[in-house]
């Protein structure tokens, strides 16, 4: 005999911000899981329950269909929906607490210590930018309407880009990047030799696995990108720090390193000092690589955000460099860091190896943002956005330098720079950059210290100021820096 229809105790709470559909679904689920509505219980018809709750029949049908898909209900012809039998999930019996068991030392590799140290050094300021963190605000603070429109279009096509993708990356994006490199950087790169990554750090990690063996020496700039040095060390490389001057890395010291297997350079904008690698040193670096079989990893860091309006051609564009140079870049500064899209243009001979390493690392990047970025660049909107962003940076650089010069000149001097998203301030030796930075951090002001990212054998002392903040943010923060340095100066005199 069929069970009678049971009208569940349901109501719509007008104060509840949840949609009516969610309220009905939530309460029905609760009553079924609590055993209030038992297996076999017949529910009212869709139209009847809709009238009782003063909602549309479509709302009730959606609830019933969803709960049927999840196994809470089942549809029986000519009987409507009934409560289904839920899986018999038995609670795990509680046992007494186990007796303490002495644990011996467990194995932990040297790389575990390196990874933990890298995390300790990672500043939380990067997750919540505040003055003077040197992160390009880009689109994060001023979204481009074209990007917003393209993202919205893709969001409405939920069936697109849901499967596994080519480890090399989304094909149309690689074709777009091939064209971009040709137009703006003078680089000829086949789309099949472009690998999409999550950014420069992952590219450096993959490159270190493919190009070098454990124990190989890799030269890096000093001061330079500490995270890159950490990645190379984490992958088993011996990191040799090479000093830089106004012409970039000292190639004579790279050559003197003897058995170096590679060199990592930021040739367009040396991090952190902002100098370009001179044409003579680009040629010398290429000559070294071709002669020794070494690799050049060229990070196109900040080539589009410059104080000057011109940029030199990258080393990768020089004839012969295509066989020994990994050219990498990311969209963290020109779009926003959370986009997590970078790329590498690699020699054809190692293209499959790079793609395979990407596969073994995380299979591939999600396609949805790649698709948005591809169309954004292809439409010309990215070029326009970058020109506007670069102009804004130049304006804010000039404002910052004038304001900072008036306030901080008694405590040091600014280094000349042609590029970059931060200004370099060299502190008077009477001050310790780390001491001042620790005090500033308590006021919510963050400055990267040169002593932390330079070679202890050739220490530097100073700050990196991310200057691309609006005047109303910059001025009070600079006033606080002046106050802290003045206080430290008085303390030292006392």
Image (tube, grey):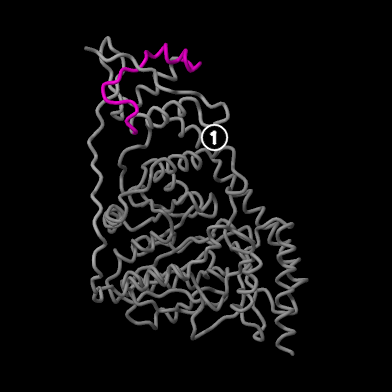
What percent of the width, then of the height, locates residue 430?
Answer: 67, 86
Residue furthest toward the front? 96
Quadrant placement of the C terminus? bottom right
What percent of the width, then of the height, locates residue 85?
Answer: 24, 28
329 left or right, relative to 273? left
84 left or right, relative to 322? left
What residue appears at the point 73 percent right and 73 percent down from the top-left corner? 482
Q: Nearer the viewer, residue 421 or 79?
A: 79
**Image quadrant assignment for residue 347:** bottom left
In magenta segment, residue 477:
no
Q: Nearer the viewer, residue 488 or 35?
A: 35
Which residue carries the number 1 mark? 149
Image: magenta residue range: 34-56
Q: Is residue 353 above or below residue 7?
A: below
Q: Nearer the viewer, residue 262 or 235?
A: 235
**Image quadrant assignment for residue 299:** bottom left
248 left or right, relative to 77? right
What percent of the width, then of the height, locates residue 189?
Answer: 38, 52
Quadrant placement of the N terminus? top left
Disc 1 packing (10 Å; few <14; some 14–19; many ≥20): few
What percent of the width, then of the height, locates residue 396?
Answer: 69, 58
């Amino acid at each position: 005999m069929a069970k009678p229809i049971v009208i569940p105790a349901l109501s719509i709470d007008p104060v509840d911000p949840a949609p009516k559909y969610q309220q009905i679904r939530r309460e029905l689920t609760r009553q079924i899981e609590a055993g209030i509505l038992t297996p076999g219980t017949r529910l009212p018809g869709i139209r009847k329950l809709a009238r009782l709750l003063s909602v549309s029949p479509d709302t009730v049908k959606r609830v019933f269909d969803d709960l049927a898909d999840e196994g809470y209900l089942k549809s029986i012809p000519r009987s409507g929906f009934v409560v289904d039998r839920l899986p018999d999930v038995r609670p795990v019996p509680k046992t007494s607490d186990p007796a303490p068991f002495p644990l011996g030392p467990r194995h932990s590799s040297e790389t575990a210590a390196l990874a933990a140290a890298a995390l300790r050094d990672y500043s939380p300021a990067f997750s919540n930018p505040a003055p003077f963190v040197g992160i390009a605000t880009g689109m994060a603070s001023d979204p481009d309407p074209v990007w917003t429109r393209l993202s919205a279009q893709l969001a409405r096509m939920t069936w697109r880009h849901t499967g596994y993708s080519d480890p090399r990356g989304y094909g149309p994006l690689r074709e777009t990047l091939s064209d971009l490199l040709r137009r703006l950087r003078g680089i000829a790169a086949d789309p099949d030799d472009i690998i999409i990554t999550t950014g420069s750090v992952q590219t450096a990690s993959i490159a270190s696995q493919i190009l070098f063996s454990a124990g190989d020496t890799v030269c890096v700039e000093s001061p330079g990108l500490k995270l890159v040095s950490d990645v190379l060390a984490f992958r088993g490389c011996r990191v040799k720090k090479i000093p830089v001057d106004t012409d970039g890395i000292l190639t004579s010291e790279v050559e003197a390193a003897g058995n170096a297997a590679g060199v990592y350079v930021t040739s367009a904008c040396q991090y952190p000092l902002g100098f370009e690698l001179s044409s003579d040193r680009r040629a010398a670096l290429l000559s070294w690589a071709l002669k020794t079989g070494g690799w050049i990893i060229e990070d196109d860091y900040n080539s589009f955000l410059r104080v000057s309006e011109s940029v030199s051609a990258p080393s990768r564009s020089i004839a012969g460099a295509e066989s020994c140079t990994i050219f990498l870049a990311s969209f963290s500064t020109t779009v926003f860091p959370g986009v997590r899209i970078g790329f590498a243009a690699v020699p054809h001979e190692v293209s499959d190896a790079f793609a395979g390493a990407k596969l073994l690392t995380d299979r591939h990047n999600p396609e949805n943002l790649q698709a948005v970025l591809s169309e954004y660049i292809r439409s010309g909107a990215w070029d326009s956005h970058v020109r506007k962003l670069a102009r804004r940076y130049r304006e804010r650089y000039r404002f910052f330098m004038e304001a900072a010069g008036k306030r901080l000149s008694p405590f040091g001097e600014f280094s000349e720079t042609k590029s970059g998203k931060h200004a370099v301030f060299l502190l008077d030796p009477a001050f310790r950059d780390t001491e001042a930075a620790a005090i500033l951090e308590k006021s919510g002001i963050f400055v990267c210290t040169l002593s932390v990212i330079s070679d202890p054998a050739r220490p530097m002392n100073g700050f990196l100021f991310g200057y691309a903040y609006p005047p109303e943010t910059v001025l009070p923060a600079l006033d606080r820096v002046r106050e802290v340095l003045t206080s430290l100066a008085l303390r030292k005199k006392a």
